[in-house]
Each structure stands twice: as C-alpha cells, then as structure tokens.
Amino acid sequence: MTRAIRKACDGLSHLAAAFVKAASQPGTATERRRVAELRASPVSIDHQFGEPTPAQKRTLLPLVSLSLGYLYQELLKHRLWSARFDRGGRSANGPAVRSLATRHLGAPATDGWNVVAGAVDLANAWAFSGDGVHVCPATSASRDLPRNVRMRLIACLSVAWKFERQLCSRFPREFHDEKPNLVSPHTCELAYLAYAFLSQDERAEFGAWNAENRKRVRELYEEMVALEVALLTDVPVFSTLVHGNQVQAETRIQELFDAHIVDAEEAMIMRSIVPFFNAAWQNGYAEQPSAGALVCAAMHCTRVVGTGWGVCAKPSMATLRAAFVPSERRRAKELVQNGLSLKGLPTAIVLLGCYADPQWVNYEYMRTSTLKRALSLAHAL
C-alpha cells in the first residue's frame, strides 16, 4: 500500500511540474503580464506578503483539487478509507447498503461524502494563510507546492474526512509504543497521509515507512496533529464545510425533489455529476459557481438523455425557469460550455475518475453529445 501511495505522490509531483512549466514560459504580451502578476502575488517567493486575496488563491485551487482528489481516490482504492453507504444494522453477510446512493455515488470521483470538496473549501480558507507560506508557479525551478502548504492541505483533507466519516478509516496498526499500553499499536494515519505528500527528496531524507523508523514517523505525526489543531482553532470548520457549494447543491436538489420536479433516481444522477461541473470551472481565474448553478447544469444533462423525466410529469419551460434565478441559469450555461472545452488541470481532475469511464453507470450524461444538447437547452432557458 505504501508503494502505491508513493507512486501516486510521484504522479502529483509530475503534474505540478507540468503546471509550473506551462506558467513559466511566457510568449505573448498577455502571458508576460500574467507572469508579472504572479510574481507580484502573495504566493510568489519574490516577496514577503500578508493574507492572499481570493483571486490569488484561485490560481492554486485547480492544483489543490487535483492533488487532494488523487490522494483521496487512492486511499479508497486501497481500502484505507471506506466510503460505503451503509444502511445500518447487520446481516449474515455484513451491513446492507443504501442501493440508490451506492449505485450513483459509489465511484470515488463523485465525492459522495463531499470530502474532497470540503477539503478544498478548508484549504481556500486556511492553507495559504500565515507567515512563510509561499508558492511560485511562475518559475520553472519550483516543482511543487512548498512543504508547509502540502502539510496544510493534508490537515484539510483529514479534517474533512473525519467530519464526514469519522469511524471509517481502515489503516493498519503497526507502530508500538516503547512501553506497553492499552492504545498501542497506533496507525499514525495523519503521518501516513503527510508521507504521501512528501517529494522524492523529502522521502529519501525522511526514511522508510516502517516500525524501525518509528521516531521520524512520530515526529511527523505530532507535526500534523499541531496543524489539525491550528485548523480547528483558526477556521469555523462546521460552517465552512456545510456551506460549500457542493454540499448546498444537495439541498437544492432536495428542494426540486420536494417540488416533484425530479424523482429520486434523477436527483441522485444529478448529484453524481455535480462534481464534474465543480471541476470544469477551475481554470485558475473563474469565480466559484453557486450551488444553484451546479444543480442547473446537472439538470440540463439529465433532461436531454432518454426520456429524462423519471416518474415525474414533464415540467414546462416556465417551471424550469422558475426553479433557478437568471444568474444561476447564466452560470450553468457557462459550466456546460466549460465541460465541452476542458483543458489544463480541469481535464486532469476529470480524467482521474469515472467521468471519462464509459463503464460508469451515468457516463451517458457526460458524453460530448449529451453536453452539446444540454448546452442547447441552457440557451433555450
């Protein structure tokens, strides 16, 4: 398992390097101005800065989303974390699952528990703050986010996971205390997550992940615990996580269900493709879309595939217009267009998981032909 996470971490370094290289080769006047802006930003290594602005944070969010999404999917794939949708109770073969949620949100990329989306929201609020937090995507010498930022990102992912799925970690217990006690052995899960975000040079200096290197593992663990505590004391974690656009999208879908505009099946399909549009906008400069815009874009896709209406009566165009305010409809149209013209890091985020997999249960809603018809519907609204 450690080898798999190390391979994943190496992949993240290469992706970061590609991002940095692209940003470091200005050609046109516009590109040169862009580099000048980056060098004058609070995430440049050229200066000492205070709090970064929202616009400056947005330049890093695509790389953050890609990195956290990659690690999250690897942890689920190797069953170190469990994202099952248990119904509760037990049967002879284990706990039953909620079949509708499992069918549509079982793929890790759908972020069924909003862990990655929550971690990104926490990162936006906290990971780039504080003294000594500098990132320079404008120089080819920088190959990754600085270590202190990466460790903060891990703290954000860990807190988001615990908020959603506190008792669903399956890490092996292999680190014993020097003196016997009732809580030993330990998983050192936080340190394991941090180890996954170390660069190759940093891992070489750190040493192997095993019991013989217990002292270094414990030091890394204590460092990460301190960061978690700092996050919990510096940021209103509960409100940040529950007010994120992807979480609020679930509330909007519930309202459509209660109004009999969508049925349960279509509601879950819409929720499963919301993360696709939450990735499509992350080009480094666009504003984060509202929950309503995400849901509206997802509904465009469900309404143009097959009958598209489930057991609900087909609503009129006036009903659909009334379900979303004009600004949400306009942004939804932009999101569908973004989905049709993916490039750069949004493409890498989408390619990580099910949205590019023809075998995925809801892949038909992500086809190019579907997105084109959805765009036509968006123009009609």
Image (cartoon, helix red, strand yellow):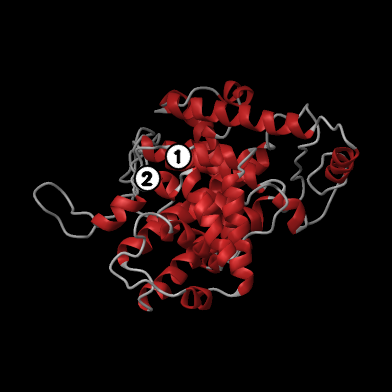
Q: Name the residue type under label 2.
A: Ala
Amino acid type, mark 1: Gly
Q: Residue furthest left?
A: 92
Q: Nearer the viewer, residue 301 or 111?
A: 301
Q: In this rendering, does residue 186 appear at all?
A: no
Residue, x 51% and y 65% (percent of image)?
296
Residue 258's spot in the image, x, y percent?
36, 77
Q: Are marks 1 and 2 in contact (CB under 8 Å)?
A: yes
Distance between the Cα atoms at labels 1 and 2?
Answer: 8 Å
Q: In the image, is 277 to the left or to the right of 78?
A: right
> Is any atom of residue 77 visible in this view?
yes
Indicate left or right for 56 with 177 as reference. right
Give the labeled residue for mark 2: 107
Question: Mark 1 vs mark 2: which is more N-terminal?
Answer: 2
Q: Position of residue 205 (x, y in %)?
A: 61, 22
Residue 23 left/right relative to 218: right
Residue 349 location, x and y as percent? 55, 41
